[in-house]
Amino acid sequence: MSPAVRSHVSLVLPHELAGGDLVGLFTEMGLEAKRGQDPDEWMIRRRTSTSGRAADDLVSATTLAAPWLREERFDMLTPHPQDIVAPTVTRADVAEEIRRLNAIAGPSSLMRQLYPVQLQLTTAPDAHLTDVTRDVHKQLSDLRFDDTRETLFPDLAVQWVSMNRALFSRAKLPTILLRFEHDGALHDEVKRGVAKSVSEESLFASSEAIAGGGLLDATFLGPLLACRSPNVWTAHGLRLGNTVIFNLGRTIPGLAATPAEPLQLLPRQSTHHAHEAVDSPDRRSWSDAVDWWARRLCQLFECITDPTYFRDVNGRYLPYHHQNWLMNSEELFKRVASAMTSWRDQYAARILMFSALDLVSEAFLGSNTADLCSPVRAQRALKRVKKAIPGRVADVILPCAEAAVAALESVADGFFISRQRASGSVTITHKNGREESVPPARAVAPLLAARRNATHGFGGKTADVRAARLLAQHDGTIPDELIHLPFLYLLEVLCDWEGIRHRIEGQSRRAEV
């Protein structure tokens, strides 16, 4: 279900922009536009179909091949043109890269099969992508276990995840307004037809490396593809605004047993135990998870790219507020995925975890990190997403989130004095001698908040004395799986697009920028 049809929002742009076809530019963004009452005023809103739904899906997922399909559908693969912007990579270049890989990877290493998949899909010319995808599918389908006839990936499926072109151009809308606001001469130059970019740089580049780039580089798929980390369940090839995903139908180890590079021999904290793969009982679950994620991204993007939600009390468009939400959304997906894939350096993963919790709590959930570190709050979030996610999809997506909740609850075991004394509570002795008893589970959130605050250093003039006394009674152990906690709250965000919409609208009504 898409958001309801909105009334128009007002903005000011010279009608000479886009070669005098500003309506055409808005149409490219998936927006309806009409002239307002004031000079250069435009009234815009999201374009919808006769049913009131969005005219086009901003994200779509198509299954191209799978054991349960009667026939392959590789002809449905329709990439955005990439040849004109991609660097020239020859077949010889790819072959040389594969040769280097084979020289360092063991003969039984799956990297010898999976990395070439990514290389071929990423570098294939547009006209050859369909054939390359079909060939790669055959390569992976034919892989066998050593000395047996059993296929390695019997449930292999191929999916094509595509971002609508309107999404890219719509994400540029706030940058256009911001350039005009910060460059008063530009409006007159556009009116006179003399506006030119400087040194071939974009005229409208406000924060373009922070907001919008993730629509092109699969940032928003990152947490999904990492949802079984440190194990892996996909091989993928990134195209310009599109991604080919090969669902392996099972998980494989994502980490080598030994360091793969000399850099990994430097001092660091890494995971201390193996992680058992828990596979889905239904072979279609993996593809269902991609479909579900694409639909949820579609709903999220309808919220964060629709300019009518970013309107003040007078119906005027708020480009700053819109840009902030685009940047926060991209940052959230990046931080969650980075934390989930940093198993080689658990300390770095933990810092990323706290950073992701800060962002999702304050910007998306209207809360704080300490609240999200409460086992009770985490259990409530898990219950919500379990209710919202279909069973087969949950089999794929939820194991890491469930492990994070269990890890959060186990933090209470680190209160060693309470454990050794079997007191059932953590006793905080204050400076004046007053004692305060706190159940270990309730002490977890303030303890982790203190660990989060320690990114600025322990102690100091504004130190939380109560937190210091909790730190003194804990052995400092934080389970590896806790780095998946932000993923749980990202799922909560994806399962509640209406809550995000209400938050955007409420902030817009109070906005002062």
Image (tube, helix red, strand yellow):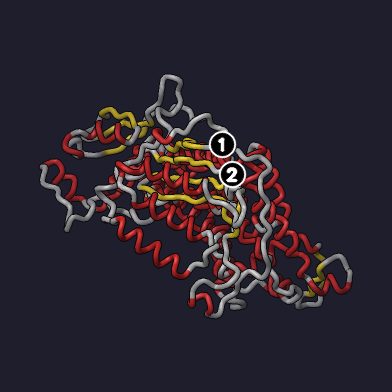
Binning the other alpha carbons within 10 Å of mark 2 as few (below 14), some (14 to 19) or many (20 upward) gives: some
Picture coordinates of residue 167 (x, y %)?
A: 37, 40
Kind of residue sitting beneath label 2: Pro
Q: Residues within 10 Å of mark 1 (few under 14, many from 20)?
A: few
Q: Quadrant of residue 90?
A: bottom left
Q: Secondary structure at mark 2?
A: loop
**Looking at the image, which is closer to me, 156 or 361?**
156
Marks 1 and 2: CB-CB under 8 Å?
yes
Tag shown at residue 154: 2
Mark 1 vs mark 2: which is more N-terminal?
1
Q: Is residue 101 above or below residue 388?
A: below
Depth check, front residue: 461 or 354 = 354
From the viewer's perspective, tell me whether residue 187 is left or right of residue 217: left
Tell which residue pokes out farthest to the right in this image: 422
Instruction: Name the residue located 81 percent from the left edge and 62 percent from the top edge.
Output: 439
Query: Residue at 64% of width from left, 36% of height from top?
Result: 390
x and y percentages locating residue 281 in the rendered image: 68, 42
Q: CA distance from mark 1 to mark 2?
A: 8 Å
Q: Where does residue 285 sit, x and y in percent of width and height?
A: 61, 40
Residue at figure coordinates x 48%, y 28% from the top left: 4
Q: How many marks?
A: 2
Instruction: Give the residue furthest to the top.
Output: 50
Q: Which residue is located at x 18 percent, y 48 percent?
A: 186
Is 459 left or right of 115, judged from the image as shown?
right
The amino acid beneath tag 1 is Pro
Residue at mark 1: 67
